Amino acid sequence: MTVHRMILLLFLCVLSESKVFAADERETQASYSDALQSMKLQKYKEASRQLKAILQKDPKDKEALLLLGTVYYQNHSFRKARAYFERSDASALSSETAFAWGSVYFHFEDYKKAAQGYRYVVKSKAPFRSFSIYYLGVCYYKMGQWSRARRFFQSVDPGDLPQFMQNNRKAYLAEIRQKQDRLLANVLGSNPTQSLRQPSVVEQFEATLAKEKEREKDANLMSEEEFETPRIDIRIPDRLETPKGFVSSWRPSLQLMQESSSLDNFNLNQDSVTLVAHREAVETTMGYNQNSWNTYLRLQAGSQSYDATIQESQFFQLEQTTGIFASESDRRQKLDSSFGHLEVAGSSNLGQYFRLELSAGYLALLPRYDSKLMWGDASAQAQLSFTASEFEANLQLEAHMPFDQADNKSTQDFVVHTEAEKVLGDFRLGLTAFQWMTQDETYVSRDRYRYALLDPELRYRVGYLSELGGSGSLSYNWGESTLSLKGSATQRTSKDGKAIARLSRLDEIESVALGLTQVSFTAQFPLWDSFSLSGSGAVQQLTSYLYNDYDESGNLLKSYESDVQQSLFQIGISMPLTNWLTFSGRYHLTSQEYSGADVADKEFRRRNPDLTQASLLLLDVGQTF
């Protein structure tokens, strides 16, 4: 009997507690709904009190914490909003709080957490979806996920964005194209040492915006009485809006690079190069922005050095002996230089879809800090871009005047480059065409290693007068990954219409072939928010490759001309470790098959590689203030 009474008493207690809990839950839900309604009416003080009353009963109520953080966000109190968000987590996000979560963490440059909020808005089709798509693009750009960033920028309709977002969207897309071209262009056989990431104009101006943000009133000092006067409902993060009037920033930077390459010449010779280069610079940018026209002046100065260790091995067999003998020779080539770069540029938005950019610059490098050895380039550029929701096109005109006082030579170059891209759902169709011309074919590069960590515009010259080329590509967005198929062709012309012999046995053979035709496949996989992997495979046909064999006195012994079929494979990684530190790496493998009358000659095989391997590590450190 006693046991039955105890069980009955326990049951009544549990029933009573459950009724109390249910009543409390209904009361909490009602209070939460009231607080949400107060926030929508911009009655922030009332919403704050209602939510704090909920948190007094349950300090771990995730929904109430998120909504209270949203209230403070709506009133510009970013630090206090983040403090409440930190006590909750993204699993409790709702359509009322997700955009605020993303915007607050975006404000504090925590782009990984910001993307959580914006992704929720995009997937749930909550309010401000177009803005969230745009800021997802910005977040992934900041984290070095350029393929992801490009996909979001291209998927948002510019007509759904305010003018400042439209302007920045164009600038971001232009920067992403440059970064992707530099990261993946090596499949085409371009100089792998010309992969330096340059700071963008968008990044330069953001430093000024950061300074303005620091001057904002510290939200932690906000008292509850300040909720009495509602502020403007910001809803849209305004940190990226280009500030009007005078802006300025400065950026110290450091690039470290190590490149190792090996050329295997049919097991007869093996040439290897280990190149270590570093570049230190300080850059100052000053600009003036108006509603439709922006101008800036950029000054950059610093030093650039390289140290190349070159090892040449020759394998041979002596008569009446067994085994393979080897002779090796090592040499070292190094150079320290200082440089200065001056650039003046302006850009203007011509209506909703067009953008015009003009620039002129002068770059001078002083090897061994000697002005008598100065070389560099003076340039002028004009670019007209068209950007719509699913179509982009641009036309770029360039004029260059490279010079080298050590050789007492200079020439003039002209470049025309055009490209267009159409978005078809998850597919992208791209077309490009270019023409490069120079006036003096005798202006030939004297040192291939000095181009390390310099802009690609300072091209390695072998003696051709012009290049004409084009490409077509089809890309597919497969989830977060991008798959690309590309075909390209390039034709070069010389003064006599013939091929030009390779300048050095260490040069890539594709640098002197008269024609190049390539089909490539590239896949880019973002593994995490700050890590991406890319892989490429290509088949390339070279026409009219020329090699000249000389004796020790420099007399021509024989000329060999051949077509070459190359198979190229590359894998690369990119890891933005922080906002100011990026690590990238690449491994490249190329095999060659020669077809010509005398390619079986031992001397030809001894001097021309059938297998080339190269690896590159690049560390980029830089912060804009």
Image: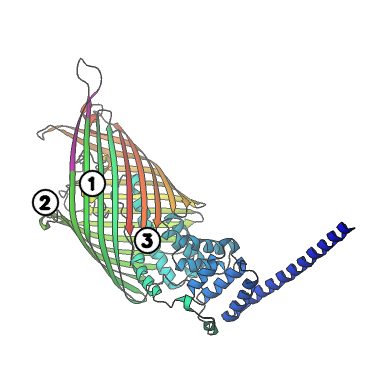
Task: Give the quarter of the figure containing the N terminus.
Answer: bottom right
Q: Is residue 566 left or right of residue 268?
A: right
The answer to whether any part of residue 334 appears in the image is: yes
Q: Position of residue 441 (x, y in %)?
A: 17, 49
For the residue labelled by badge 3, is the local secondary structure a helix, a strand or a loop? helix
Q: Which residue is mark 2?
A: 407
Left or right relative to 107: residue 588: left
Contact check, label 1 and label 3, Cβ < 8 Å: no
**50 or 551, which is in the foreground?**
50
User: In which quadrant of the rendered image does the C terminus lie?
Assistant: bottom left
**What secondary structure is marked by label 2?**
loop
Q: CA distance from mark 2 to mark 1?
A: 24 Å
Q: Is residue 213 left or right of residue 454?
A: right
Extent of the magenta region = 314-332
The residue singled out by tag 3 in the image is 174
Q: Which is nearer the N-term, disc 2 or disc 1?
A: 2
Inter-mark Cα distance, 2 to 3: 36 Å
Answer yes or no: is residue 513 visible: no
Q: Residue at x 46, y 66 (%)?
A: 106
Q: Is residue 313 magenta?
A: no
Mark 3 or mark 2, which is nearer the start of the sequence?
3
Q: Residue at x 16, y 50 (%)?
A: 443
Q: Residue 388 at x, y = what percent?
A: 44, 64
Secondary structure of residue under mark 1 = strand
The label nearer to you, 2 versus 1, is: 2
Q: Which residue is mark 1?
A: 493
Q: Is residue 323 magenta?
A: yes
> What amino acid is labelled 3 in the image?
Ala
Kind of residue at disc 1? Thr
